[in-house]
Image: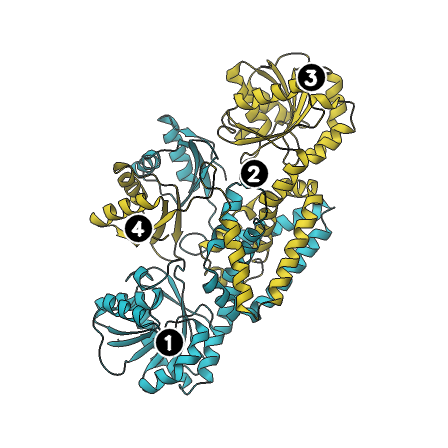
Chain colours: A cyan, B yellow
Amino acid sequence: MVRTVRIVGSGLIGTSIALGLRPHSITSQMIDLDPARERLAQDLVGQAHKGPSELVILALPTHAIASVIEAEFALNPHSIFMDVGSVKYEPLQHIIESSLPLERFVATHPMAGREIGGAQAARADLFATRTWIIAPGAQTSQEAISVVTDVIEALSAHCVVMEAGEHDRAVAAISHLPQILSSLLAGSLHDLPSQWLELSGAGLRDTTRIAASDPGLWSQIIYSNRENLKGILDSMQSSLHDLTDSLDDPAQIAEFIEAGRKGRARIPGKHGGKAREYSYLPIVIDDRPGQLAAIFNECATIGVNIEDLSIEHSPGQLSALITLSLSSSDAQLISNHLLSIGWNVHPVLK
Amino acid sequence: MVRTVRIVGSGLIGTSIALGLRPHSITSQMIDLDPARERLAQDLVGQAHKGPSELVILALPTHAIASVIEAEFALNPHSIFMDVGSVKYEPLQHIIESSLPLERFVATHPMAGREIGGAQAARADLFATRTWIIAPGAQTSQEAISVVTDVIEALSAHCVVMEAGEHDRAVAAISHLPQILSSLLAGSLHDLPSQWLELSGAGLRDTTRIAASDPGLWSQIIYSNRENLKGILDSMQSSLHDLTDSLDDPAQIAEFIEAGRKGRARIPGKHGGKAREYSYLPIVIDDRPGQLAAIFNECATIGVNIEDLSIEHSPGQLSALITLSLSSSDAQLISNHLLSIGWNVHPVLK
């Protein structure tokens, strides 16, 4: 395990890495273009070592790698380097065009929450239980991969190896496209009368939740992965076009909705593996403190595990509908139990 | 208040109406094309009256209204009629082309959950706290509106008046478009490698949740509202085209994401009114029964109200991230409290 790390970029990700490595007696030099950010981050993570570091972590927007790589290589001529960007092909190009030998670079991508920003939001356990993709190139040395894997595992993250180009195609499809379609939908709400928006249900709220994401961050991610996104967006346009052309034929519309249903069923459920079929238990509650706690207590009492939960409020009303996602047997157990003690439980849905 | 109702269509909506009216001493004749469904529904709602009914509720797919309206009018020549379909312009056309005098028809749309199906899933309180749109025409009589309003209020729903054409444009934008984009996105997952889907996060799950909806039901809804959807889908295609053309310009991509953020902010929060700004409190928990209950207990103990909640599981891990949506002051209160008793609470996000 390395003992000294240099982290270039003192935002949420970089600072969280340094905080997480500290209990392992690894010291970090925090670096940032902005001296105030750098000072804050270094204060948070404790005193740095002097001189070169064994590992340099490029924790900055991928397009900024080109502007720092030569200076960093000059300062740390024997170090291993890794990045943590949301796309993997572009940073690799920056490295290929630099003096850094390719065997010493490992491209990586921690799948950690992004709504948070800045060193002040950093946490030592930000990566705990998260997937962290490593995308080593053909020339990357085993030593470099081993150093980076140790660091990722020290942060309690879960390593998954994927080729850089494949990584970028994967996140285009499962992360960048959902962001674009959510933003597209949310953008279309802009000129609607308020009275229409008053009719919004859980469907609109779910589908537009990620549209609240940071435009600065997301424009860079989408820009960096534009080559993969072009084809996907063309295909979305063409599917929309086909649907528009088939609006006069209910059978073709049904096929379109059915294709979505099949695709949705492929998303893995909790703990990976195949998507699990949950049962859904709707309960109408008074919308005041203690109601949810009481239900969760009952679940705990009879040993029922809640897999997921949604809360829906009706405009102008003081009650709420909560829907618990449960295994089929648990749903039946807790439904009978709650009914027997007077809760307003609706029939279990599959 | 009417005393006798005839409900044509013995599915979830029709049977729930009958169940909800029963405590008000209103009897219902349940009707269905399928004799088994009709019998089940009638058994559930109790004995029917004989002869004509004061109110006829058309609780069947809107395209099916044309096939029943003449016979129903002949059987109930002095009744008031209402429908409960998801679109309002098309049923109105069926009525205009029928012998039923327009003054006796009220178009309505209860905004009630749709994943449930069939009489066996019906509940007397299905409409409690829900919005129920009524879309009377220029010729609809005050008496008809008053009868229908009384029935809706007896079901504990909340009446909102909207013109039929406006209703259809509104639901096209806030309900049918989200369904189409969610199905479009989910459909694109169909051919992806499983390993890619293993990387799915909460964003993909949220945006595709409603893609699991019933194809038969939704193809009819979309078909019935196709005139309004054509223009919206054209505009979506053109926005996607513009975005594709601007992928080389991060500033234009940022504008696109920002437009979505502004649109999203217009969706009203809990209890109507403007979208509320919540604070978000992330907590890492062990993924076993009792953990959520314990947190909700603590919230109840110090009088903190949870506005919403999400649960995110990492593949292959036995811990989960829950995020509570709270008012800013409540978030601070419960965060301090949970930290003081040893929970793994992360900093509050705005």
Q: Which residue is mark 1?
A: A82
Query: Is residue B193 something that shows in the picture?
Result: no
Q: Is residue A307 above or below residue B249?
A: above
Q: Residues within 10 Å of mark 4 (few under 14, many from 20)?
A: some
Q: Amino acid at mark 3?
A: Ser
- The residues bearing labels 2 and 3 have C-alpha atoms spaced at a distance of 32 Å
Residue situated in front as seen by the camera: A209 or B258? B258
Q: Which residue is mark 4?
A: B285
CB under 8 Å between discs 1 and 2: no
- The residues bearing labels 4 and 3 have C-alpha atoms spaced at a distance of 58 Å
- The local secondary structure at tag 1 comes to strand
Q: Is residue B197 above or below residue A42?
A: above
Q: Quadrant of the N terminus of chain B?
A: top right
Residue visible at 57% across and 40% down? A196
Q: Amino acid at mark 2?
A: Gln
Q: Which residue is mark 3?
A: B79
CB under 8 Å between discs 4 and 2: no
Q: Amino acid at mark 4?
A: Ile
CB under 8 Å between discs 4 and 1: no
Image quarter of residue B42: top right
Query: x, y (%) of residue A247?
Result: 71, 47
- The local secondary structure at tag 2 comes to helix
Q: Is residue B191 above or below residue B304?
A: below
Nearer the observer: mark 2 or 3; the answer is 2
**Relative to A126, is A63 on the left or the right?**
right
- The residues bearing labels 1 and 2 have C-alpha atoms spaced at a distance of 51 Å
CB under 8 Å between discs 1 and 3: no
